[in-house]
Image (spheres, rainbow, N blue to C red):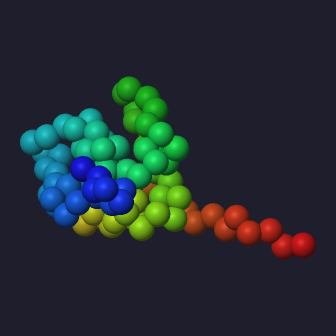
């Protein structure tokens, strides 16, 4: 759950890190990620039923970066599902 400042609490981050995809379903983990994402309606997009595409934008919010780090520490999620991370430079040169 997000705290009053919009950051995920330590217990939730631990749940994400320890989510066992051998015994629990992926949809439960996706719900947990959504619950712990600041600006969820703008930052996370989940599409598909049989093939699921998760698009997660941190928006530079450090709490959302914490969620990504928790996913990185979840060995099953990271090895089985994560395909790429990109960093977009939105600055423009004039």
Residue drawn at x 17%, y 46% is: 21
Say how many tags the image has. Answer: 0
Q: Is residue 90 visible?
A: yes
Quarter of the image with the C terminus in it: bottom right
Residue drawn at x 52%, y 44% is: 42
Viewer-side residue, 37 vs 85: 37
Q: Place residue 76 in its image quadrant.
A: bottom left
Residue 13 in percent (x, y) is at 22, 60
Q: Place residue 88 in its image quadrant.
A: bottom right
Q: Place residue 87 in its image quadrant.
A: bottom right
Q: Is residue 78 visible?
A: no
Q: Image height check: is 23 above or below 85?
A: above
Q: Image height check: is 47 above or below 84?
A: above
Residue 58 in percent (x, y) is at 48, 58
Residue 9 in percent (x, y) is at 23, 60
The residue sitting at the right extreme is 94
Q: Is residue 62 left or right of residue 93?
A: left
Residue drawn at x 84%, y 73% is: 93
Residue 16 in percent (x, y) is at 22, 55
Q: Image height check: is 49 above or below 23?
A: above
Q: Is residue 78 left or right of residue 56?
A: left
The residue sitting at the top extreme is 49
Q: Is residue 18 left or right of residue 61?
A: left
The residue sitting at the left extreme is 23
The residue sitting at the bottom extreme is 93
């Amino acid at each position: 759950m997000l705290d009053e400042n919009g950051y995920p609490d330590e217990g939730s981050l631990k749940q994400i890190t320890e989510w066992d995809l051998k015994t629990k379903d992926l949809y439960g983990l996706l719900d947990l990620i959504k619950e712990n994402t600041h600006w969820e309606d703008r930052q996370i997009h989940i599409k598909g039923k049989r093939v699921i595409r998760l698009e997660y934008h941190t928006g530079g919010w450090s709490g959302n970066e914490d969620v990504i780090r928790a996913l990185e520490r979840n060995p099953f999620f990271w090895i089985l599902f994560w395909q790429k991370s990109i960093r977009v430079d939105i600055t423009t040169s004039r």
